[in-house]
Image (cartoon, grey):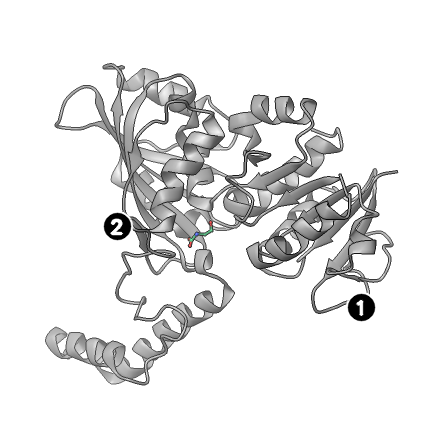
Amino acid sequence: MQKVAFVGYRGMVGSVLMERMKAEKDFNGYEPFFASTSQAGAKAPDIGRDAPPVADAHDLDFLSEMDIIVTCQGSGYTQKVFPALKQSGWNGYWIDAASALRMNDDSVIVLDPVNRDAIDKAIESGIKNFIGGNCTVSLMLMAIGELFRKGYVSWMTSMTYQAASGAGAKNMRELVSQMKKIGEQAGGLLSDPEASIDELDRNVLATMTATDFETENFGAPLAGSLLPWIDAGMEDGRTKEEWKGFAETNKILGNNPPIPIDGICVRIGAMRCHSQAMTIKLTKDIPLEDITQMISGSNEWVEVIPNTKERVIKELTPAAVTGRLSIPVGRIRKLNMGGQYLGLFTVGDQLLWGAAEPVRRMLNILLGKL
Ligand code: HSE
């Protein structure tokens, strides 16, 4: 029986992965092990069957016994442990939610509803490293990957509205603390319908700009505001998140030459759903009805939302999508620039299809279950 180790199963992505695996009754057909950087010796998590006590995630002897390692521990861990493990002669499968190995030639970025053919070819050719993609990229491709696959995209811009969860659990807490503080400080002004809106507005701004306003993680107020910068800066003026949109999308699709993709990535005060507004130049003037059909038929999770205010504000929002695997796509229309120009909007749960789900499914592919 194959041995599979799960590393970083208690963090945000790791916990969502465990929940999804339990919900899908995935813990069977192999021997599961758990490893942690801080909980070695603890009881294994409740997965509905026995598993040995938690191992030390830095123990190379333990890791080298594994046929498959699934890690949600983060890039720092991968950079430290992966090269040492390979050097020791280990030749198992490495499935990783972090970005460290994504762009390596001997890694495939996994998003099987979009690139199952590339995954299968890679397994056949002996590739061992299968890495989950950037959340924004995976969610975008779940929504409109079919337009790329059919060769209908000449170029694309994606303007993103990214949730706090993409920055980490501490950032999610900070966002809610900021909201709480703003609400508390507004107190009486908010409960008095006669209070002047100017006064309320000044009160909120004063709270957000006060020196004791909690901004340790984001570096600036996010509640009541937004932050048009995600991740590190690159030399060409892009942020790393914006660069990934181009580099990872083209790698997943195997495009050569690459398709121009660019945009501006923005952090907003949503909890865990990323949203994106896309402008696409099509390679030809395709009727809207054909485009809609192509999108809705591309996978079982995508959902086209009719372009009415009522449906859009109920179904095409982070509040509607959180905790769900569905990928709604809406506001689909041709733009004033001409018949080849398409606009649309999509939302997806950053921890599900954006992180845990492609990794969960990759394990099942390697185990022959999918
Ligand atoms: N980098 C993403 C974000 C999350 O900051 O929202 C991980 O893909």
Image quadrant in which you'd find residue 198:
bottom left
Residue at 34% across, 71% down: 219
- For mark 1, give the secondary structure: loop
Q: Position of residue 132 (x, y in %)?
A: 56, 42
Q: Position of residue 156 (x, y in %)?
A: 29, 31
Question: How far is mark 1 from mark 2, CA to CA?
Answer: 46 Å
Residue at 62% across, 37% down: 130
Q: Nearer the viewer, mark 1 or mark 2?
A: 2
State the quadrant of the N terminus: top right
The number of numbered badges drawn on the structure is 2
Residue at 46% across, 26% down: 253
Front residue of 194 and 115: 115
Q: Which residue is mark 2?
A: 237
Q: Amino acid at mark 2?
A: Gly
Residue 303 visible to an observer of this rendering:
no
Q: Amino acid at mark 1?
A: Ala
User: In this image, 216 relative to 109: left or right?
Assistant: left
Q: Nearer the N terminus, badge 1 or badge 2? A: 1
> Which mark, residue 42?
1
Front residue of 353 and 254: 254
